[in-house]
Image (cartoon, rainbow, N blue to C red):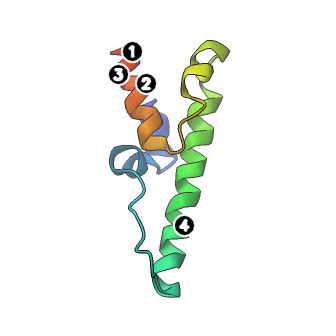
Amino acid sequence: MNVMFKYQDVLDIMNEGVPTLARIATDVQQAPHKDVKNIDGKTMFLIHRCMNGDIFEKIMHYKNAKETWDTLEWLYS
């Protein structure tokens, strides 16, 4: 799957996750953060598409790609 993540240009999100945004963020700070969150959503979609129903039930409650991927690595390594 790492090859797919690299091809889709989402490997950084898998390894680093979405950085937290300051409580009082400017518009300049919010725009790139929104882009990163969109990439995280794309990554979650890719992960979900590759899982069968049994595995999906184990990961469906996670909210971000890094947490989901870390769990999958822990479950299957």
Q: Which mark is residue 76?
A: 1
Count of numbered circles on the image: 4
Determine contact: label 1, label 3, CB under 8 Å: yes
Q: Is residue 27 left or right of residue 16?
A: right
Vertical relation: 40 (above or below) 57: below
Question: Badge 3 local density, few (<14 within 10 Å), some, or many (20+)?
Answer: few
2 and 1 marks in contact (CB < 8 Å): yes
Q: Amino acid at mark 4?
A: Asp
Image position of 45 with respect to 60: above or below: below
Q: CA distance from mark 2 to mark 4?
A: 25 Å
For disc 4, the marked residue is: 35
| Amino acid on which disc 2 is placed | Leu
Rendered residue at 45%/81% (across/down): 24
Label number found at residue 74? 3
| CB atoms of marks 2 and 3 within 8 Å | yes
Residue type for callout 3: Trp
Mark 4 and mark 3 lie on one chain; the one further toward the N terminus is 4
Query: CA separation, marks 4 and 1?
Result: 30 Å
Residue drawn at (60%, 30%) of the image: 60
Mark 2 and mark 3: Cα distance apart in space:
5 Å
The answer to which of marks 4 and 1 sits earlier in the sequence is 4
Mark 2 residue element: helix
Q: Mark on residue 72? A: 2
Marks 1/3: CA–CA distance: 6 Å
The C terminus lies in quadrant: top left
